[in-house]
Amino acid sequence: PLPVVAVVGRPNVGKSTLVNRIIGRREAVVEDVPGVTRDRVTYEANWRGRRFTLVDTGGWDPDATGMALKIAEQAQIAAELADVILFVVDASVGITDSDEAVGAVLRRSGKPVVLTANKVDNQLQELEANELWSLGLGEPRPVSALHGRSSGDLLDVVLDAL
Ligand code: GDP
Ligand code: MG
């Protein structure tokens, strides 16, 4: 089986945009990873000739009550099934309570985490990404999933962690 990279984070940070950016047009739903429900959509991805399974999490209703708990639960499940976790934070918003909750789950998991500072659409916004150091998950990697800015650099870091 291919190594599994799970994309986690609270709603609206750009997880699905990042997944689409990574899989491009070669999108294909692959076989079920154990524990994957309809809330967690799996794709086969490829970077520099290395194939891996990419899991997009978080199809739940963002208005549901108990959302922070639900997000933390999803992060927990993703951490269990993944070899590497791509934790996405919206650098244009900064760290929220939900981000803190996910960060705590991931720090406990012991799995390699690549901290992604998304929505860094230009060089000026790169400074905002530095705030994410406080999550205690290492170096924040600034990207723009929407525009593709630095997404190749991010994937290089993911491959190094696999
Ligand atoms: P998800 O809920 O985490 O899967 O987030 P989505 O991928 O659905 O994105 C939520 C919103 O953020 C959408 O309107 C996206 O177009 C926007 N978005 C995603 N990535 C970026 C980015 O890099 N820059 C900007 N400016 N917007 C983004
Ligand atoms: Mg999504």
Image (cartoon, helix red, strand yellow):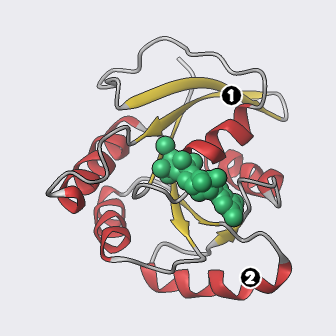
Residue 154's place in the image compared with 7, above or below, is: below
Please state if 82 lies on the left or on the right of 24 as rendered. left
Q: Residues within 10 Å of mark 1 (few under 14, many from 20)?
A: many
Residue type beneath disc 1: Ala
Q: Which numbered circle lies on residue 45?
A: 1
Of 85 and 65, nearer the camera is 65
The answer to whether any part of residue 76 appears in the image is yes
**Mark 2 vs mark 1: which is more N-terminal?**
1
Residue 147's place in the image compared with 119, above or below, is: above
Q: Which numbered circle lies on residue 125?
A: 2
Query: Dividing the picture into quarters, in which one does residue 110 lie?
Result: bottom left
The answer to whether any part of residue 14 appears in the image is no
Question: Regarding ligand 1, which quadrant of the image does it lie in?
Answer: bottom right
Q: Which secondary structure, mark 2?
A: helix
Q: Residue furthest top?
A: 31
Q: Residue furthest front?
A: 63
Residue 38's place in the image compared with 12, above or below, is: above
Residue 143 percent location from the top left of the image: 73, 63
Please state if 64 lies on the left or on the right of 144 as rendered. left
How far is mark 2 from mark 1, CA to CA? Answer: 28 Å
Residue 141 percent location from the top left of the image: 67, 68
Residue 94's place in the image compared with 26, above or below, is: below
User: Measuring 42% from the left and 40% from the top, which residue is drawn there?
Assistant: 57
Please state if 14 lies on the left or on the right of 156 as rendered. left
